[in-house]
Image (cartoon, rainbow, N blue to C red):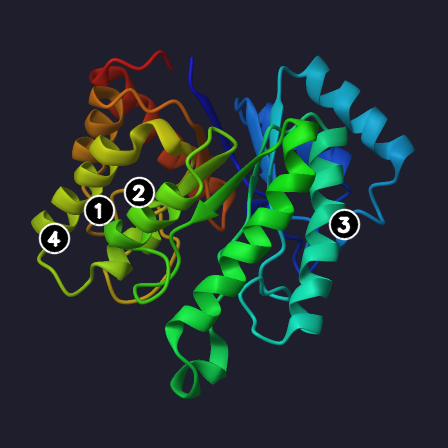
Amino acid sequence: MIRLGTNQDPFCLRGGGFPPFEEMLAGVAEMGFNLFEFCPEYLEQSPDVLTPARRRKALALAGSHGLKMAVHASYGSLNICFINEHTRAESIRQLKREIELAHDLECDAITVHPGLPTGLRPWYPRQYFWDMMLRSYEQLLEYARPKGVTICCENVDPRFVGRLEHFQSLLTHFDGPDFGITFDFGHHNLIYGDLPVQRRTDKMLELFSRFGDRVKVLHIHDNRGQRDDHDQLGTGEIDFAAAIQGLSDCGVDAYWSMELTSKRSVVNSAATVRKLGGEAGFQV
């Protein structure tokens, strides 16, 4: 049976902020899901707030609901490819704390963005940023490997890490099972936004065919190829019927995490995922 769930975003409170972590876990279960992917950058689920005692209680609560957890590492405040070594080192330090959190909550996958070259991109070769990213992932893997946590790189940028050739290079460098891919459907649609919709689908299916055994997490949302809108499935351009059939054909075994902004969108999208998944042969 696939692990299907959501991240924390649909639980955002009116006026800002989020409920306690334990309340969101219960909410995910009440919605009929068996996966909760959370981001420690949000204040209510940071490593400081989720103390060891709360981690033990949260793990027991998740177990009572049949929930599995996964971690989406902080990304807005951290940058593992930054070429200032001191800034990059602090990102690594914080990410190690989040890997420790993942381990304590028995999460076997953590999504770590490859970073962005930022405003310095015009003045330095791409290779500078790429080398820093590789060095960072090497350090994180060394820390995560004995804890049984897989590092997953997400497709985020058409010029840095997002296209097939980028993953070919990255997965050749990190060729072990402890380094995988988080495939974001919405990002893919933007990364290949210069192509017709059918060609974007072809590129997606090619990625599943070539790297399907390395895809560990799916981020599910829709858009129309212009902005990262995180829309409900079926309201954008992405061909999820073809995508989910491709996942089945290529034997992709991953966590299915919806990244939407309202509970209604999550529930409606889950119904679509279950319908298409059943038709593709997944046990849903």
Disc 2, SS? loop
Q: Earlier in the sequence, mark 1 or mark 2?
A: 2
Q: For the residue marked with disc 1, what is the amino acid?
A: Ile
Q: Earlier in the sequence, mark 2 or mark 4?
A: 4
Q: Which residue is mark 1?
A: 238
Q: For the residue marked with disc 4, what is the amino acid?
A: Val
Q: Position of residue 219 (x, y in %)?
A: 42, 42
Q: Which mark is residue 93?
A: none
Disc 4, SS? helix
Q: Which mark is residue 233?
A: 2
Q: Earlier in the sequence, mark 4 or mark 1?
A: 4
Front position in the image: 14 or 278 = 278
Mark 3 or 2, which is nearer the eye? 3
Mark 2 or 4, which is nearer the eye? 4
Direction from residue 147 to residue 80 in the image, left or right: left
Distance, label 3 to label 2, CA atoms, is 29 Å
Q: Position of residue 53 (x, y in %)?
A: 91, 31
Direction from residue 284 to residue 73 in the image, left or right: right
Contact, mark 1 vs mark 2 (Cβ under 8 Å): yes
Q: Earlier in the sequence, mark 3 or mark 1?
A: 3
Q: For the residue marked with disc 2, what is the amino acid?
A: Leu
Q: Which residue is mark 4?
A: 197
Q: Which residue is mark 3?
A: 46
Q: Earlier in the sequence, mark 3 or mark 2?
A: 3
Residue 69, relative to residue 120: is it above or below?
above
Residue beneath the point at 39% across and 54% down: 230
Distance, label 2 to label 4, CA atoms, is 15 Å
Disc 1, SS? loop
